Image: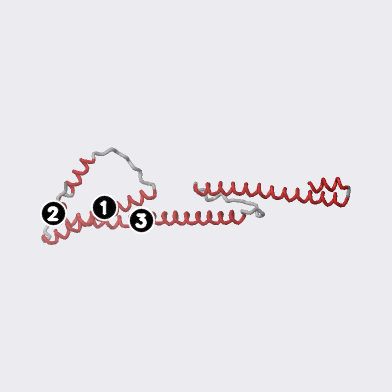
Amino acid sequence: LLFLIISFQGGSGVHFIISLAILGLSLYILNRYLKRHRQSVTDIGRIVDQTHRIKEGDYDTKLNLSPYGDFYFLGENLNAIQKGVASALEEKLKSERMKVELITNVSHDLKTPLTSIISYGDLLLKEEGLPNHVNDYIKVLNQKSQRLKLLIQDLFDLSKAVSGEMELEIKTIDIGKLTRQTLGDMEDDIKKSGIAIR
């Protein structure tokens, strides 16, 4: 601008045109710089918003930045990371669903033959005239099959709990009473262990 003023006062037309051209070029460069700076600030704001969305669990919204901006490749990398996280999360959920389905199916498949074993064990207990050692075997068979039934039910309940299908009923309990009941149920095992429980 100073050069333009000096050229204008000096009276040389060539200097004036050169000064005008330099001024125009300077204004153009300044305008481009300000646009680029404004675009960079906008892109940074979009990147910050996108990282917040990802943190909140939004893996679907993609970040679109101008391919001519300074942060375009950063935005593309962020989109790739977002896609990778979404894919890993989907695989994990799929794996969890398959695991729950497997546990549910195995539990169900084990229940049917176990019910038959328990029924036949009960029938054998009612048989008369069997030797004492056979009756002992049948009692052990029935105890173990009842234990297996409880384990299978626990497995089934676990799969329901993991899948969210089990309803919880929350109640206030007397912890002292619960402890006394537990100790009463385990009295024989406690005596055999030789451990004094206080």
89 relative to 79 in the view: left or right: left
Residue 19, image x, y percentages: 82, 50
Q: CA distance from mark 2 to mark 1?
A: 27 Å
Q: Quadrant of residue 113?
A: bottom left
Q: Contact, CB < 8 Å: mark 2 with mark 1?
A: no
Give 12 or 113, whichever is nearer the viewer: 12
Q: Contact, CB < 8 Å: mark 3 with mark 1?
A: no
| Residue depicted at x 62% and y 47% | 41
The residue singled out by tag 1 in the image is 150
Residue 137, image x, y percentages: 16, 60
Residue 40, image x, y percentages: 63, 49
Mark 3 belongs to which amino acid?
A: Ile
The residue singled out by tag 3 in the image is 103
Residue 43, image x, y percentages: 61, 49
Q: Quadrant of residue 118?
A: bottom left
How many discs mark residues in the rendered view? 3
Give 92 or 151, whichever is nearer the viewer: 92
The residue singled out by tag 2 in the image is 194
| Residue depicted at x 58% and y 51% | 62
Give 149 or 67, whichever is nearer the viewer: 67
User: SS class of the residue under badge 2?
Assistant: loop
User: SS class of the residue under badge 1?
Assistant: helix
Q: CA distance from mark 3 to mark 1?
A: 15 Å
Mark 1 belongs to which amino acid?
A: Leu
Q: CA distance from mark 3 to mark 2?
A: 38 Å
Mark 2 belongs to which amino acid?
A: Gly
Q: Nearer the viewer, mark 2 or mark 1?
A: 2
